[in-house]
Image (cartoon, rainbow, N blue to C red):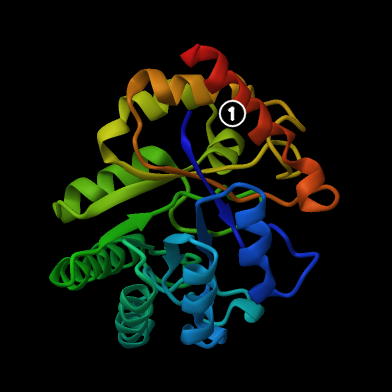
Amino acid sequence: MPRFAANLTLLFTEVPFLDRFERAAKAGFEAVEILFPYEWPIAEIKARLEGHGLQLVLLNLPPGDWSAGERGLACVPERIGEFREGVARGIEVAKALGAPQLNCLSGITPRGSSADLVRSTYIDNLGYTAIELKKVGLNALIEPINTIDMPGIYLNRTAQAVAAIADVGSDNLFLQYDVYHAQRSEGELAATIEKHLAQIGHIQIADNPGRHEPGSGEINYDFLFDHLDRIGYRGWVSAEYKPRAETEAGLGWLARARQRATESAA
């Protein structure tokens, strides 16, 4: 059975953010991820992690002004200085909280900039990020996001991400494979994961349509979880979905995964 983490930005939203750690632990998760932990006192988050025996496995670099529609700054030529300040802030928080990796959102392709300039800015910023993270023993991730949910997002296909990783050439830069986004963009989930297994540092899950819990839509997650075991994936699989009701009521997929693992081991 894969190792499952809970995304505390999307799950357990029935309670305030700092109370979600307890709910995740009681639900049986041993790890969590947070999209952007920067608005809460780091000491408070650390206390919740330690108090409930949880590991923080992922956070994102600062995305710019999220409320204004910004979705990362890595590809934006006129924001390089701000992006690199965000790298420093992300490293500071990750080290304080024990997170081993940070996701770098690509950003929305800026209007009026040439495709070559946008790409060179993105690759240069990824190279800078990988170098700075490697200095402190952290990994960098990049995540293709579907353009239906996020129009204009620069990084939107697996092949595009793999090419960027090759161009940067850093051994601490990996692919964050979001099953929901991949299903909306390109499908061919199992074969793509297997093909790029060595480059995948983290997996996120949600079903389609609706980005709800596994088992609510068209993706065969029983098969996919077994497939991850068969091909030897050893990273975390994070539940990053929008529960249709109270979070605990939608955790049947997790109970099924545990039951199938027990039956397989018997």
- Left or right of 25? Residue 169 is left
* Residue furthest to the right: 245
Task: Report the front residue among 3 and 233.
Answer: 3
* Residue occupying the point 49% across, 61% down: 53
- When asked about the image quadrant of residue 92, the answer is bottom left
Relative to 16, say whether 144 is above or below: above
Q: In the rendering, at what x and y percent does residue 170 appear? A: 15, 55
Local SS, label 1: helix
Q: Is residue 15 visible?
A: yes
Front one among 50 and 205: 50
Which image quadrant for residue 249? top right
Left or right of 114? Residue 126 is: left
Total of numbered circles in the picture? 1
User: In terms of depth relative to the viewer, which is nearer, 6 or 153?
Assistant: 6
Going 20% across and 71% down the picture, which residue do you hit? 128
Q: Is residue 6 left or right of residue 135?
A: right
Q: Look at label 1 and name its amino acid.
A: Arg
Residue at left offset 37%, top offset 87%: 82
User: Where residue 251 sits: x, y (%)?
Assistant: 72, 40
Q: Is residue 188 visible?
A: no
Residue 57: x percent and y percent? 41, 58
Write down the residue under mark 1. Answer: 258
Q: Residue at x 48, y 48 (%)?
A: 156
Q: Pinpoint residue 97: horizontal percent, then vertical percent.
A: 39, 74
Residue 50, compared with residue 163, is above or below; it is below
Q: Residues within 10 Å of mark 1 (few under 14, many from 20)?
A: some
